Image (cartoon, rainbow, N blue to C red):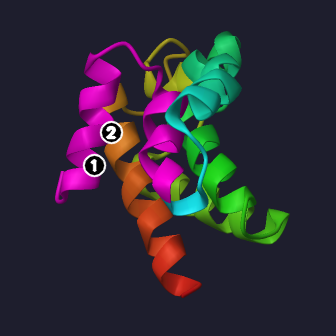
């Protein structure tokens, strides 16, 4: 984890936020959305949308990117996450499916925050 936003996002995870909340709530100040509202909006997206499907950190990233851009950009950055971690499905990242390498949630959160920051820098 290279920067303070990543560290703060991982800390959120350790303090009861799910992965989607940890990522999405890390960017509230950029979009003028208060923490409580974003926390509630992103709650159902943790744990792979509650079904170990799309990684919550990736959906949190998509929430932030989606506020400023199109499906093309969310797909592009989800693909960057997949390239970094081998997949973007929670069940695979957790090792439940028996596919690929196991990537812990804090690393997924940090990767999603870094990619979101990369996206935000690219649209300045």
Is 74 on the left or on the right of 71, as rendered? left
Q: Is residue 2 at all visible to an observer of this figure?
A: yes
**Tally of marks:** 2
Please tell me whether the stretch drawn in magenta is mainly helix, strand or loop: helix
Q: Is residue 80 above or below residue 112?
A: below
Residue under the image location 62 percent in, 16 percent down? 52
Tell me the number on the disc at residue 9. 2
Instruction: Report if the CB atoms under discs 2 and 1 are less than 8 Å apart.
Output: yes
**Viewer-side residue, 33 vs 85:** 33
**Viewer-side residue, 24 vs 19:** 24
Q: Position of residue 28 (x, y in %)?
A: 52, 48
Is 44 on the left or on the right of 123, as rendered? right
**Residues in magenta, as a range:** 1-29
Quarter of the view holding residue 102:
top left
Q: Is residue 120 above or below residue 31?
A: below
Tell me the number on the disc at residue 54. none
Which class describes the residues within 10 Å of circle 1: few (<14), some (14-19), or many (20+)? many
| Circle 1 residue | 6
| 44 part of magenta stretch | no
Q: Position of residue 118 (x, y in %)?
A: 44, 73
Q: Position of residue 93 (x, y in %)?
A: 46, 28
Q: Position of residue 83 (x, y in %)?
A: 49, 58
Residue under the image location 19 percent in, 59 percent down? 3
Q: Is residue 43 above or below residue 66?
A: above
Which class describes the residues within 10 Å of circle 2: few (<14), some (14-19), or many (20+)? many
Q: Please, what secondary structure does the residue beneath circle 1 have?
A: helix
């Amino acid at each position: 984890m290279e920067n303070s936003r990543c560290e703060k996002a991982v800390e959120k995870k350790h303090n009861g936020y799910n992965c989607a909340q940890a990522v999405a709530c890390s960017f509230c100040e950029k979009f003028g959305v208060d923490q409580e509202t974003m926390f509630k909006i992103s709650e159902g997206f943790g744990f792979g949308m509650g079904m170990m499907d799309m990684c919550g950190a990736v959906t949190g990233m998509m929430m932030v990117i989606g506020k400023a851009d199109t499906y093309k950009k969310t797909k592009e950055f989800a693909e960057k996450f997949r390239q970094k971690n081998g997949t973007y499905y929670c069940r695979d990242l957790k090792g439940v499916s028996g596919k690929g390498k196991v990537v812990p949630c804090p690393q997924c959160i940090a990767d999603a925050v870094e990619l979101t920051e990369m996206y935000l820098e690219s649209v300045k």
